Amino acid sequence: MHRAILAYASDLGPLATAIRPHWQPGMQNASIDHSIWFHDDLRVDDWLLYCLESPWAGAARGLGIGRVYDRSGRLVASVAQEGLMRLGRQD
């Protein structure tokens, strides 16, 4: 159950990290794909650190990469997400 909850929650951040420097009113985004790799057991009812970065954005897409660490500093999961980022129609 803890892995399922982390998989669900981890979908919220990587694309937001990619879009942030490019954001402007009317911006639309959508997840194209989202992957997660579990490296160790974890508990979502304890402290977790979710480190996010966006190494690339362009051509109306963005890439977000995340690492999840537990309280002791162990890397327990890695996340990657690619998403669509574009200005919506201006009517």
Image (cartoon, rainbow, N blue to C red):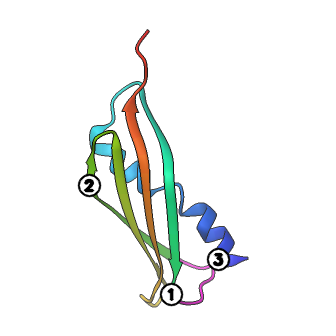
- The disc, 1 or 2, on the residue closer to the chain's N-terminal end is 1
Task: Kindly state the secondary structure of the residue where label 2 is placed.
Answer: strand
- The disc, 3 or 1, on the residue closer to the chain's N-terminal end is 3
Task: Tell me the CA gap for discs 2 and 3.
Answer: 27 Å
Where is residue 81, by image quadrant? bottom left
The amino acid type of the residue labelled 3 equals Arg
- The disc, 2 or 3, on the residue closer to the chain's N-terminal end is 3
Q: Magenta region: which residues? A: 40-47
Dot 3, how many residues are within 10 Å of its Cα: few (below 14), some (14-19), or many (20+)? some
The amino acid type of the residue labelled 2 equals Trp
Task: Kindly identify which numbered label has been placed on residue 3.
Answer: 3
Q: Which residue bears the numbered disc 1? A: 39
Residue 16: x and y in percent read 42, 49
**Residue occupying image coordinates x 26% and y 55%:** 56
Our reading of the magenta stretch's main secondary structure is loop
Q: Where the C terminus falls, by quadrant? A: top left
**Residue occupying image coordinates x 73% and y 76%:** 1
The reply, left or right, for residue 3 in relation to residue 47 is right
The amino acid type of the residue labelled 1 equals His
**Residue occupying image coordinates x 66% and y 69%:** 5
Dot 1, how many residues are within 10 Å of its Cα: few (below 14), some (14-19), or many (20+)? few
Q: Are marks 1 and 2 in contact (CB under 8 Å)?
A: no
Is 36 colored magenta in this rendering? no
The reply, left or right, for residue 38 in relation to residue 61 is right
**Residue occupying image coordinates x 54% and y 90%:** 40
Question: Closer to the camera, 65 or 24?
Answer: 65
Question: Closer to the camera, 70 or 17?
Answer: 17
